[in-house]
Image: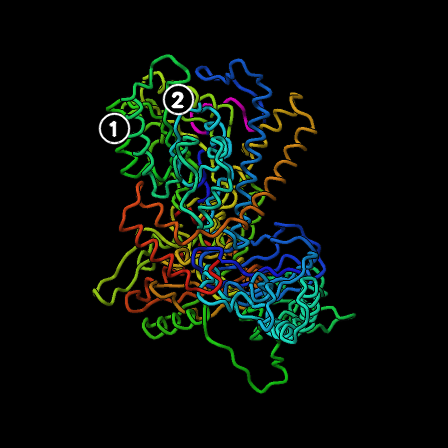
Amino acid sequence: MSELLAPTPTGGPDFVQLLTPEGQRVEHPEYSFDVGEADEAEVVRGFYRDMVLTRRIDTESTALQRHGELGIWAQLLGQEAAQIGSGRALRPQDYVFPTYREHGVAYCRGVDPLRLLGLFRGVDQGSWDPRQNNFANYTIVIGAQTLHATGYAMGVQRDGAIGTGDPERDTAVIAYFGDGASSQGDVNESFVFAASYNAPVVFFCQNNQWAISEPIERQSRIPLYQRAHGFGFPGVRVDGNDVLATYAVTQAALQRAREGNGPTMVEAYTYRMGAHTTTDDPTRYRMSEELEKWKLKDPIARVKVYLTRNALADQDFFDEVETEAEQLGARLRDGCKALPDPSPLSIFDQVYVEQTDELAEQRDGYAAYLETFEGAH
Amino acid sequence: MSEYKLPDVGEGLTEAEIVTWKVKVGDEIKINDVVVEIETAKSLVELPSPYAGVVTALLVPEGETVPVGTPIIRIEDGVAAPAPELDLSNPAATGGGEGESLVGRNKAERGPVRRARRRTIPEAAGEHAAKADVQDVFNAGAPQQHDQVMHLVEAVTSDIPEEAEQLPSAPVVGTVETRALAKPPVRKLAKDLGVDLGSVTPSGPEGTITRADVEGAVGMPAQYAGNPRDVAAPAEPGRLEEWREPIKGVRKMMGQAMVQSAFTAPHVTEWITVDVTRTTEFVERVRTRREFADVKVTPLLVLARACLLAIRRTPVINSRWDEDNQEIVFKRSVNLGIAAATPRGLVVPNIKSADSLSLLELAGALGDLTAVAREGRTQPAEMSGGTFTITNVGVFGVDAGTPIINTGESAILAFGATTRRPWVVRDRAGNESLEIRDVCTLALSFDHRHVDGESGSRFLADVAALMADPATALLF
């Protein structure tokens, strides 16, 4: 019985992998880990640091929810490589449309994790400026962001910001979504539009095997990446727990979009090691042995083994990263509790770009009403 | 000193049950160390500590359900003032105009300005006292220097632990600290019978619990309910003429289901005593096979398989009487129910489409099902849709019984204890001899509205034949 529910042990024949779970570098005929002029070891150490810090953001936030400081938190445990690999392949002008679980991508885009906490604490509706980091607000509606991304990509196309050969101008758009969202109408519609208009968008699907309690077996009869072919654009499945492969595959897909060759779907084959959110209890619907199997494919452990075995990093490096993670955890704990409650008046300021007279009047009236309370200041 | 208040770990939950404490008084803990496992309406959740320090009190006993916001653990972290939240920013308190009130006010009394983001919590008696004392001091015109307030708060809170010791936490602290003394086989017996060793009165040397103590404890209401609260606050049934327990939860469901079944479906029970020596041998042989190394191979597994095979020949066993439509509903696949005694009472989870599983898969499924049931994690979906049930009463050492059909099914088979008994064995030449064999009794109850004596008997005889000689399976 449990065999039937177990995920495919490997991702199938078309699975792109460059670093095995045992930390061995392997070759792939089409994709290679290419960092250009940069020092490769430095880049891999950077990925390791990124993933450790991302995991810390995640575990600390989960704990903060359990402390009663957050209303809810969507965990990414196990998906660090998929997010860091793809996030680090982006250029500054590229634009990201995330779900509500892209904490690692947000980190890559320079969004302060404390801003993410504001949303989950319920003190704001997402307080980062999407234009500042080219990172849109978290989208709670499943799959809706793929339409936003396709529309934005069509705009990029109309601005002529593709295929110019200028690496600082040519722009790609990336839409993140999950295996569950792949069944949504919005996602399929965005595939149709992106294909028809050859929009410069990468559909980055993190297949973490579970749409809350629904296993991937009930989401699709075929591997998800193969769906792209039916819409008329290429799809590729990459080991989403392999940060090097995810980086290489995403980089190629983004470059294809920037050059004006249209959309690509990337299926990052990974696993949600935690719960869907802090409100969910996965032990109710999946066997712990499945989790144990995936723990052996941990995205961070394999990079650490690789760095250690090839003497690309010493103990001091790992200790430093650990210390940094501790500091980040403490900063999140303290910062979260210090997040100010929103002013009741702020709702009036965020309705229209230009304030109307009527709304200004309502605002003043409400302000005067608040003044009547003792200790209002 | 800090107190961790029960958070809302879901969205909009109002209460949770304290299931297991992972720490005890005196333990030193770090931030985010897991301190307790709680169960909400939605999930089983481990709570990490927001504080680092030494645990000074567990404020809620295991098994108790408390509202969100209730302090559940007290940790000495070097930070004073868990009790009243004093607001000294009030101009009346700090401005110091003559004749003005010098009362430091509790924030909760400030009225509508306070946002209702966090739930108000029932305040402990000690907090009331603390607040009153603080106010009295200020009313008396004492200088309101901050450190004096802190000193006072410390003094007040240091009184609370003694008071808390008498609260319901005390018995639990006791059980956590003193582990009952018993030898490993006795522990296993207690586990098998669902007896909490902490509640058994020891009669062995040096206060150890004997096998007889555990057996004597079976059936005592406190253990049967498996409710830690009963254990924590023993009613000492030995001294009372009678005692009462609420009918609720799993026990209530069991009662309703039994009444409905017993007084709706006319039950007939048949039984057969069978020599299962060959099944015992078969089990031994299968156990040595490598592919079965990770699963539990038991006579129950063979019986389950035998029933699944026998149902093929007598499909009416796997059917249901539909009173409303005046039809008999035959089921193609068998959802095999296994009655399990769990800490929460009787539950009957079932293995979906058990007839489509190989012996190995069936063994795995049986193992998963019992493990989940023992941990009390059986989900409603796993208990619904059963089509036939086996109840393994043999584990309690009894020969058989007249089981009551699980509602919505047509038959239930009781598997009695296998014992070594004298048995007449006939060899191929027809010579009879008396031998000591493994013998057990199978008892089948069926719904006589639509299962007639012939069908029921054939099914039972088929199962018995398979148990007497598993090789007969080739004939099915």
Residue B234, image x, y percentages: 62, 76
How many residues crowd around disc 2 within 10 Å: few (fewer than 14), some, or many (20 or more)? many
The residue segment tinted magenta is A11-21
Q: Between marks 1 and 2, how big is the CA–CA gap?
A: 18 Å
Q: Residue at x 58, y 16 (%)?
A: A39
User: Which residue is farthest front?
Assistant: B98
Which mark, residue A193? 1
Residue B167, quarter of picture: bottom right
The answer to which of B132 and B447 lies nearer the viewer is: B132
Residue bearing mark 2: A254
Q: Chain of mark 2?
A: A
Residue A337, image x, y percentages: 54, 50
Q: Amino acid at mark 1?
A: Phe
Question: Which secondary structure lies at badge 2?
Answer: helix
User: Which residue is farthest left?
Assistant: B325
Residue B443, quarter of picture: bottom left
Picture layout, residue A243 above or below residue B384:
above
- Residue A20 is covered by the magenta coloring: yes
How many residues crowd around disc 1 within 10 Å: few (fewer than 14), some, or many (20 or more)? some
- Image side of residue B100 versus residue B10, left or right: right
Q: Amino acid at mark 2?
A: Leu
Residue A15, image x, y percentages: 44, 25
Which mark, residue A157? none
Residue B5, image x, y percentages: 56, 61
Picture layout, residue A102 above or below residue B396:
above
- CB atoms of marks 1 and 2 within 8 Å: no
Whether residue B440 is visible here, answered yes or no, is yes
Q: Residue at x 40, y 71 (%)?
A: B258
Picture layout, residue A230 above or below residue B47:
above
The answer to which of B21 and A124 lies nearer the viewer is: A124
Q: Earlier in the sequence, mark 1 or mark 2?
A: 1
User: Which residue is farthest bottom?
Assistant: B241
